[in-house]
Image: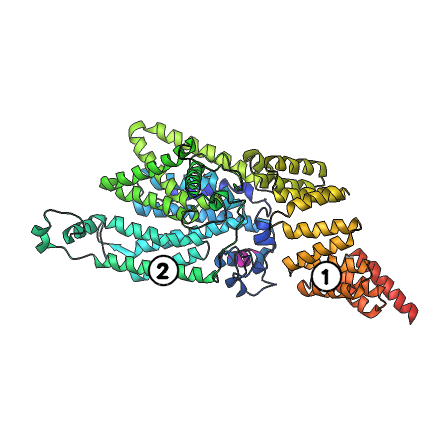
Amino acid sequence: MRWMDVFLSVSMSVLVYLNSLNGGLVFDDIRGISKNEDIRTDVTSVWRLWQDDFWGGAMSREQSHKSYRPLTVLSYRYLNYAIWGLEPFSYHLVNVLMHATVTGLLVLMTTILVGGADHIPMFAGSLFAVHSVHTEAVNNIVGRAELLSAVFFLLSFISYVRSCTASNEFCSSKTDWRWFTVSLLMAACSMLSKEQGVTCLAICTVYDILVHFDELSQWLSIKGLVPDRKRRNVVKHMPKPPFYVFYRLILTAVCVIVLLYFRLCMNSGTQPIFKPEELRASFHPDQQTRMLSFGYIHAFNAWLLLCPYSLCCDWSLGSIPLVHSLWDMKNLAPLTVYAVIAILFLNSLIKAEERFAVGMSLAFLVVPFMPSSGVVFRVGFVVAERVMYLPSIGFCMLVALGIKRLSSYFGSVTYFIFISLLILLSIKTFDRNKDWKTDFSLYQSGIKINPLNVKMYSNYGLELKNKGEQAKAKHIYEEALKIEPNYSEAMFNLGNVYSDEGKLEDALYYFRGALQSSYTRPQALNNMATMLLKLGKSEEAEQHFLELIQLKPDHAQAYNNLASLYGQTKQHDKAETMFKKAINVLPSYTEAHFNYGTLLYQMGRMSEAESYLRMALSLNPHHKGAQNNLQVVLYDKTKKS
């Protein structure tokens, strides 16, 4: 083991991400960190996160994403929130340190597999350290699931290798069950950090088979499972079956079954709900289109490993075109990728000297990617750069082996090209970190790189609106609707812009358009009803509020708004009932307490009005309306007394 290789690789992994430390909480971090009560030691019990999904909702919920990663949430809770609260710096620091840890473990693992000669571990580690496809996993705090899973993944594999006590270079004579147990525990931890972590046990199986390939081939040949004309002549000298290998493989398989069964049980018999309009390849009714499109998506992932120039935080909707025909030229991309992998695999089987190193590299490249491929089961994304974090380990190992091979032909020129590649990747990674500093910069870069993704336009428009740039936001939404005229989120957001401008009829038009999607329909109904109320159409507004309540019985805002409508139309009994329902659904709803207190004052119930107005102020001490109304209530009470 050359510790200088580890030091150089780990140092590079930290240096290229130094400018990520001053980034904020962006993109999915808002939902996964800022709004996730499971990470808050002062709010929820630690036992709750073992029952909830990654985003803080119960796994049994119909709307749950079904991503069960309690160890990752545990790291947010105790490595960050318990010490620094929601300070972004600490979350980024832990992510960078985890990336450095994975890089160090990769160098260690590669050294164990191929030895330290020719600096192959350093080549693999340094490429992994600076590869730009990792920027999402490191910069996006919720990407820690990939990082933590990778730490346990590599620890599991290294422990498995240690459990195979070698009597010579390629043959184990027994099993160290202590290290074997550690390997299984680390595999479970990897899966509890990110679901694809369970695939590390499949890679352990590949390792055992490749290490004992000749021994197993000989035994299977003699047993007749592999054709051998001389089998009868050697049956008397048949070697002892490699039971120690079979024991490990059987126990590993049993562990995989147990882990998968546990994981399925956590889904509570339901499947995650995805948006068909965003996952067009996965939900396309034609099987040929689905398969061809998935092939093209796989090739796109491979291209991100080869040339990580076009990086974007989201590749859903129309970002990647579907492939409908067998004669589409885009089919050449996946055929090329599959052919290269097949050739490398067959070559490793034929050439014994390359079998182990190339075989293990291919295993690390292909196996961890399978759960994310969309072929085995449906996933909630089209392309996600973060899921390439683990597969890139195998890619970096293959590149390192290729450098060794090429250097024998081209000498120092090979190393010069590789160093130049590292410099270019480092510059790209350092620059990409800047995009992840804020939501504004992230979506702005997304529009440039991925101009067909209307979600990027919609999100960018929201950021412009929040910055007070209404005109620019309106223009961005209109551009999105030029690309996809029926995109409901852009229609909803454009309706909000017109609402703010006081153009109520225009706002109504776009809110009606947003009713097409089940995801924007509830809020669109609420906003439509509010517009109708402002236009004096109280009966139509009431119908929409009631429709929303029927659709979403836990929609506190709908109860509050309907109660306000009843208050304006002097239906005080109905208003009081609706306010109580709003508060019952969401006890921390400040506006419901304020509005109910105001209604009670109008009804002459001063003591009750005072109670609810004080509750509103306890929830929001700076609520001007509650402050003013409470003063009026106290003045009237004093005057009457």
Whether residue 467 sits left or right of residue 253 in the image: it is right
Name the residue carrying label 2. Answer: 257
Which region shows up in magenta? 75-80
Whether residue 249 sits left or right of residue 605 in the image: it is left
Whether residue 28 sits left or right of residue 106 in the image: it is right
Q: Is residue 466 visible?
A: no
Q: Is residue 79 magenta?
A: yes
In this view of the protein, which residue sits in the foreground, 330 or 546? 546
Q: Is residue 249 visible?
A: yes
Where disc 2 sits, the SS reads: helix
Q: Is residue 143 magenta?
A: no
Q: Nearer the viewer, mark 2 or mark 1?
A: 2
Where residue 328 sits, quadrant-wise, is top left
In the rendered image, residue 139, in percent from the top left (x then y), is placed at 53, 45
- The type of residue carrying mark 2 is Ile
Name the residue carrying label 1. Answer: 619
- The type of residue carrying mark 1 is Leu
In the rendered image, residue 174, in percent from the top left (x then y), is placed at 24, 58
Magenta stretch, overall SS: helix
Q: CA distance from mark 2 to mark 1?
A: 49 Å
In the rendered image, residue 485, in percent from the top left (x then y), is placed at 61, 38
Residue drawn at x 50%, y 41% is 15
